[in-house]
């Protein structure tokens, strides 16, 4: 093993090489690591992945799910992409926990200013890893290839939002091939970003309404006591809620964008997303293009 500041090279014969990753069909022969390399072999890891272009609902769920899992001692693994991946890393850090980012390019490749701050935080509170040479650029094939490492490091994979051709579904399918558990968060039945997650649920993935659904399945030992609630309970939704009445009244004047509903109702993004989802599932409203909603005719 070669050490340079926080940078490591971990070979497949090294004691720090992740045991779970060795089990997959084609484990990388070498991992380049920046940050805490011991996390790779010592942590109870769970992958949280999803769409790069996501909804406020998906982003909030990924953040909260990762934050609560990190608070009880689970290390969150994701791909440092925009959208759900970023929300997962940020949630883990907000929960005071650890997170591992698996790159589809070398660890010395330049990243956007937007990602630079998150990159530094992950190095201090987790690890950034890649199987590619430090200056190797990302390409159309490197990102799907790295997905096997995201699932291979983890005991399970949670998909928050995904279209049918999403890279997150590739990760989920790789997880199944590797004998890992697959979880999926339900979403709006009319949203293209829910097609992939609903497909997974229809084909046996465990539906997630909160971290208890995940922890009951994985049965990690030595964790802190989890919060016994679902995201729907957290949003305090009831079938005939005051918030639902406000939304119905607003939509009675015509379709409204999500931002308009938030401004007029005073609801939080989390609560509004969950109320809208329940109303849509109950056939009271429908989602339209441009993140707009209307009464169901």
Image (spheres, helix red, strand yellow):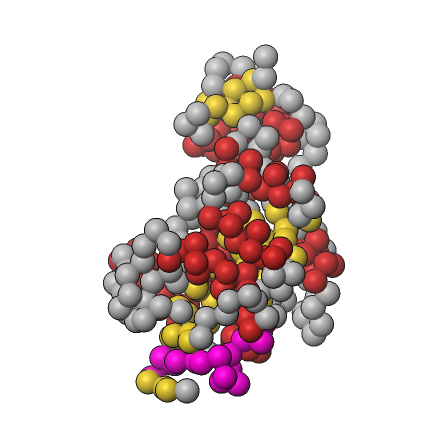
- In this rendered view, identify the residue nearer to me: 253 or 197: 197
**Residue numbers of the magenta segment:** 5-20
Q: Is residue 79 visible?
A: no
Task: Locate the C terminus and report the quarter of the image it occupies.
Answer: top right
Q: Position of residue 30 (x, y in %)?
A: 42, 76
Q: Is residue 34 left or right of residue 110?
A: right
Residue 64 image position (x, y, % from top left): 55, 53
Quadrant of the snapshot with the N terminus: bottom left
Instruction: Tell me: 247 left or right of 105.
Output: right
**Does residue 107 appear left or right of residue 16 in this picture?**
left
* Image side of residue 190 versus residue 9, left or right: right
Please provide percent x and percent y for residue 35: 41, 76
Picture residue at 33% right of the left edge, 85% below the top: 4
- The percent position of residue 2, horizontal first and vertical second, equals 37, 87
For the image, the number of numbered tags is 0
| Residue 79 shown in magenta | no
Identify the image quadrant of residue 259. Answer: top left
Q: In which quadrant of the rendered view does residue 90 lie?
A: bottom left
Query: Which residue sits at x=62%, y=55%?
Result: 176
Pick the front one: 104 or 43: 104
Q: State whether residue 128 is above or below residue 1.
A: above
Judge whether residue 6 can be spotted in this image: yes
14 drawn magenta: yes
Image point (40%, 69%), residue name: 131
């Amino acid at each position: 093993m070669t050490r340079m500041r926080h940078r490591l090279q971990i070979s497949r014969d090294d004691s720090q090489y992740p045991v779970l990753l060795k089990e997959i069909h084609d484990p990388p022969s070498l991992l380049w690591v920046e940050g805490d390399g011991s996390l790779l072999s010592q942590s109870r890891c769970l992958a949280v992945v999803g769409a790069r272009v996501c909804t406020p609902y998906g982003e909030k769920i990924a953040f909260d799910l990762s934050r609560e899992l990190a608070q009880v001692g689970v290390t969150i693994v994701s791909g440092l992409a925009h959208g759900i991946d970023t929300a997962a890393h940020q949630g883990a850090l907000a929960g005071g926990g650890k997170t591992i980012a698996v790159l589809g390019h070398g660890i010395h490749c330049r990243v956007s200013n937007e990602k630079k701050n998150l990159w530094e935080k992950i190095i201090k509170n987790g690890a950034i890893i890649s199987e590619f040479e430090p200056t190797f650029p990302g390409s159309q094939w490197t990102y799907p290839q790295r997905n096997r490492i995201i699932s291979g490091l983890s005991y399970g994979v949670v998909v928050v939002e995904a279209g049918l051709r999403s890279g997150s579904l590739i990760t989920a399918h790789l997880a199944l091939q590797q004998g890992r558990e697959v979880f999926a968060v339900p979403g709006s039945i009319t949203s293209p970003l829910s097609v992939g997650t609903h497909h997974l649920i229809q084909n046996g993935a465990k539906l997630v309404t909160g971290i208890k659904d995940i922890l009951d399945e994985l049965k990690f030992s030595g964790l802190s006591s989890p919060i016994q609630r679902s995201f729907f309970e957290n949003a305090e939704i009831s079938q005939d809620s005051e918030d639902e009445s406000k939304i119905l009244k607003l939509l009675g004047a015509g379709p409204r964008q999500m931002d308009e509903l938030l401004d007029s109702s005073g609801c939080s993004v989390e609560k509004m997303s969950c109320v809208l989802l329940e109303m849509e599932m109950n056939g009271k409203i429908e989602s339209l293009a441009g993140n707009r909603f209307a009464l169901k005719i």
